[in-house]
Amino acid sequence: MVFSSALIENAVNEFAKLPGIGKKTALRLVLHLLKQETVQVQQFGEAIARMRQQIRFCKVCHNVSDEEICGVCSSHSRQRQVVCLVESIRDVMAIENTQQFNGLYHVLGGIISPIDGVGPEQLNIQSLVERVKNEGVTEVIMALSPTIEGDTTIYYLSKKLREYPVKITTIARGIAFGGELEYADEMTLARSISNRLPLDSYVKP
């Protein structure tokens, strides 16, 4: 791809670093911005920079937040005894979009995957154990993607929580094995949350 401007080329290269954005799409985005008023482009750039500089992670559940405690954790209308365990913030958004869950969340920040060099020590596991131990949690819903890595993580966590009087459930198998949670349609995901299963019926030690 030949550019008549080094400035445009640099901008295209930066956009092309985003996931799912190729050079042609990046060029379309850059040319679109080029047609906008300068103030609009400045607002766009400032919004991205401000987001990256000021975003926080909830110190309770590790979800993204504008404050020290996210809106879900600080809400008095949520069912505080039920915690839905998810891999990433995208999964929180997917479940919230179903409007079928009114408990709290805990974002692991990934799943156990030795082949990718991700072990339990890289995940937000200890803070989950502390919540179960100290915050009166009566149920943990293991809402992880139904993959080998997801199952491995569920099994590991079930062993970590075994000594506490907490009910451990998993989302129902409306989600196909090997699928990614964030790509499930909202109806399937909502039914999986509503029809969650006791862990004993899902993972056999």
Image: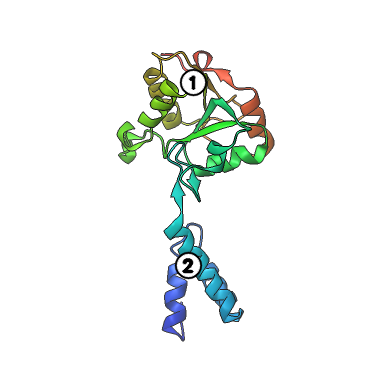
Q: Position of residue 68 (x, y in %)?
A: 46, 45
**Residue at image location 46% in from the left, 13% down from the top:** 165
Front position in the image: 33 or 5 = 33
Q: Visible in this render: residue 19?
A: yes
Q: Position of residue 21 (x, y in %)?
A: 51, 62
Q: Which residue is under mark 1?
A: 136
25, above or below 71, in the image: below
> Exactly how many numbered labels are in the figure?
2
Front position in the image: 83 or 156 = 83
Please, what is the three-letter code of the amino acid marked with disc 1?
Gly
Q: Residues within 10 Å of mark 2 (few under 14, many from 20)?
A: some
Q: Residues within 10 Å of mark 1 (few under 14, many from 20)?
A: few
155 to the left or right of 190 = left
**Residue at image location 45% in from the left, 30% down from the top:** 150
96, above or below 176, in the image: below
Q: Which residue is under mark 2?
A: 15
The local secondary structure at tag 1 comes to loop
**Residue at image location 60% in from the left, 33% down from the top:** 76
- Marks 2, 1: nearer the viewer: 1
**Residue at image location 41% in from the left, 21% down from the top:** 133
Q: Quadrant of residue 111?
A: top left
Q: Position of residue 202 (x, y in %)?
A: 51, 17
The local secondary structure at tag 2 comes to helix
